Amino acid sequence: MEIIHFDRLDSTNEYAKKLEFNSNLRRAIVADSQDKGKGREKRKFVSDKGGLYFSIVIDEEIVPNKLSFITQITAAAIYKALKEFGIDTFIKWPNDIILNRKKLAGILVESVSRGLRMRIISGIGVNVENDVQNIEGATSLKTEGFIVDKESLLGEIIEHFADFYDRLQVDDIDEALNIVKRNSYILNKEILVHKNKDVLPALAKDISADGSLIVEYKGGGREAIYSSGVQIRLNNK
Ligand code: BTN
């Protein structure tokens, strides 16, 4: 993987969209800080110096397999990398990595397509030693007492992502799916599904091979939820 490093960018995901298409090369765009870091659902992702912010860019000549599962393999890769540093995290479907009940990392997967050609961009932000005091519900590795070298963490996440991605293309998702299920922050818990201004109490039942979350609504009915437009909160009543 080619790693392209910047001191500062608006957003590594946005920069990634402007690169020349090259299906022979996998790239990672890294920035020490971002002025307009993007989160899911058009939220801002605060990206001050000290954190790890990068986008993995994969160009494909044909539409790749199981796009909807890419966020889950990214989460599994971050989980596995942190575990190697002795750090146990949870995965809050669809895209948050949780440490001591607070958000440590977020994932924003985007794709751009032109005909059959497609670019996958998996954007990852990890709070390493950046100041998170003013970010509600967030923590950093440093706050939790872990000193981790950013370059080593980057290398590990990239390696695990590439491995999971290659296996996804041949439908080998067992390990990634097991990781996101076994270390889920919400499975078998009461949750609130925020959807189109509705707040629906439900039980989080399962994560499917297509990356969707299976919920059982308290009011009756079961549904496979895909991430867009949905917010999940634990129901700590
Ligand atoms: C979220 O928590 O909603 C997702 C956050 C994703 C942040 C990363 S940081 C690197 C990449 N570039 C961006 O602008 N966003 C992602």
Image (spheres, rainbow, N blue to C red):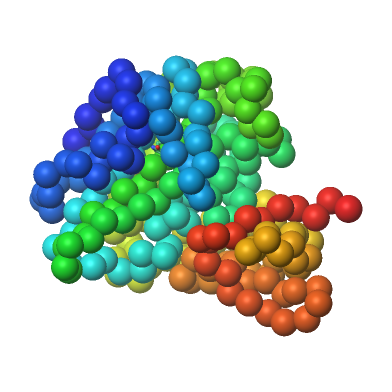
For the N terminus, give its image quadrant.
top left
- Across and down, in percent, residue 162 comes to 31, 49
Q: Is residue 84 visible?
A: no
Relative placement, left or right, of 179 versus 133 is left
In the image, residue 197 above or below residue 46: below
- Across and down, in percent, residue 126 comes to 49, 32
Which residue is depicted at the point 84% across and 51% down? 236
The residue lying furthest to the bottom in this view is 221
Q: In which quarter of the image is ligand 1?
A: top left
Relative placement, left or right, of 61 versus 186 is left
Q: Can residue 25 be seen in this view?
A: yes
- Across and down, in percent, residue 206 comes to 63, 69
In the image, residue 219 above or below residue 39: below
Residue 143 placement: quadrant: top right
- Across and down, in percent, residue 188 comes to 74, 64
Which residue is depicted at the point 43% across and 33% down? 37
**Nearer to the camera, 104 or 221:** 221
